[in-house]
């Protein structure tokens, strides 16, 4: 069985109708349970759970669980874009093939220069990203980049086009230990209408990429949907189910989820669905109750003020010192993938976290301990 089977199970399930039937007494019953079923989780995504009283209760419980599971630690990382060459025709992304933007593809020595610049901030955890083009960024190129990054960082995650299991294995052997991949939307109909060209057009191949990565030996996997493309409640529900499925099938893998919201980009795409701050908090807090041990990543798509306000509720990992352009330190950067909302440096993030009673961690000790055989 794969997650495709789980998704198919909910093909004819009306998430909206179920949520409409949830009342406050059901939410109270769910909050009294030590463990939540799939439908308990969905109940916490309903309108009945979003009332001021109930959302406060959910957030308070999420805060307690987060503190118990993770203490006051917030892991910091930064993305490194090494190529924005892309063969996809996604209307919501600046990197899409049809957009006439400035493109860059870093040579390996340029990757080294960027690595040195970022490592100088103290960060030892990095996320390497590319556009989706096998011709532009071959597996061989990805392996060379990872090998260079291994000289400067203790943990290297990748966010690239979906790969075969053997290709993920090659990257693991080169030093990659984490995968971030967003399904964009779990609604196949909407997915197919948005991805009419390029490698991303294959919904099923992308959907099963996290499983292939787990089988190839990736230590950590982050999944999620890009909120704004399809009905948000269903997207949040499927994100949680996806994370739960991976955690149960691959118990040795560190699972995390994220709820990225669409940001302004180069095209003229307008999101069909709007996800407000209140809904974001509800989705994040509900996931914490559903999967207490899951990591939750909150990127600089969110504003500094909002990220600060949600710190106690559930986030475990945040980006800092972010640029979504390729070659940021070269003086000849590409156009950005999207506009970031929080431009704080690594140092500024560290100081801010400490001032609020949180412990910023720049090294992924989980990976180091596992590498030494003590996890």
Image: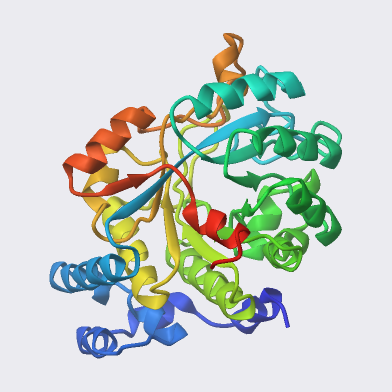
Q: Quick check: 297 above or below 301? A: below
Q: Nearer the viewer, residue 107 or 155?
A: 155
- The quadrant of the image that shows the N terminus is bottom right
Q: Residue at x 70, y 74 (%)?
A: 4
In the image, taking residue 134 as reference, residue 172 lies left or right, namely: left
Q: Residue at x 37, y 33 (%)?
A: 341
Report if residue 224 is visible in the image: no
Dividing the picture into quadrants, the one containing residue 343 is: top left
Q: Residue at x 29, y 87 (%)?
A: 30
Q: Nearer the viewer, residue 286 or 168?
A: 168
In the image, taking residue 168 as reference, residue 336 lies left or right, namely: left
Q: Quick check: 228 above or below 151? A: below
Residue 125 in percent (x, y) is at 52, 42
In the image, taking residue 127 as reference, residue 293 lies left or right, namely: left
Residue 208 in percent (x, y) is at 72, 66
Report if residue 117 is visible in the image: yes
- The quadrant of the image that shows the C terminus is bottom right
In the image, taking residue 256 as reference, residue 164 lies left or right, namely: right
Residue 29 in percent (x, y) is at 25, 91
């Amino acid at each position: 069985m794969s997650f495709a089977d789980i998704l198919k199970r909910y093909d004819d399930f009306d998430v909206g109708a179920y949520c409409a039937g949830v009342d406050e007494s059901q939410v109270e019953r769910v909050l009294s349970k030590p463990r939540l079923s799939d439908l308990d989780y969905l109940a916490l995504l309903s309108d009945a759970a979003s009332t001021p009283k109930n959302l406060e209760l959910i957030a308070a419980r999420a805060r307690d669980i987060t503190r118990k599971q993770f203490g006051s630690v917030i892991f910091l990382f930064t993305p490194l874009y090494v190529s924005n060459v892309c063969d996809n025709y996604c209307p919501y992304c600046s990197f899409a093939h049809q957009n006439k933007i400035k493109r860059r593809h870093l040579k390996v020595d340029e990757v080294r220069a960027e690595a040195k610049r970022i490592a100088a901030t103290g960060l030892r955890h990095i996320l390497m990203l590319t556009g989706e083009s096998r011709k532009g960024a071959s597996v061989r190129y990805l392996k060379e980049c990872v090998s260079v990054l291994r000289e400067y960082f203790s943990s290297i995650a990748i966010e690239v086009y979906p790969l075969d299991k053997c290709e993920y294995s090659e990257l693991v052997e080169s030093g990659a230990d984490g995968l971030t991949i967003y399904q964009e939307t779990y609604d196949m109909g909407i997915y197919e209408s948005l991805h009419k060209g390029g490698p991303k057009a294959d919904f099923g191949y992308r959907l099963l990429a996290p499983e292939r990565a787990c089988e190839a030996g990736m230590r950590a996997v982050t999944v999620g949907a890009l909120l704004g493309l399809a009905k948000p409640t269903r997207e949040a529900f499927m994100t949680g189910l996806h994370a739960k499925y991976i955690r149960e099938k691959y118990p040795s893998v560190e699972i995390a989820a994220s709820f990225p919201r669409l940001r302004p980009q180069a095209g003229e795409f307008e999101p069909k669905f709007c996800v407000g701050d209140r809904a974001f908090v509800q989705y994040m807090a509900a996931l914490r109750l559903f999967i207490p041990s899951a990591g939750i990543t909150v990127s600089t798509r969110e504003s500094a003020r909002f990220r600060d306000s949600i710190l106690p509720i559930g986030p475990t990992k945040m980006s800092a010192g972010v640029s979504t352009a390729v070659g940021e330190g070269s003086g000849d950067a590409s156009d950005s993938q999207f506009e970031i909302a929080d431009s704080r440096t690594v140092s500024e993030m560290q100081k801010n976290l400490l001032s609020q009673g949180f412990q910023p961690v720049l090294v992924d000790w989980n990976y180091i301990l596992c590498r030494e055989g003590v996890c």
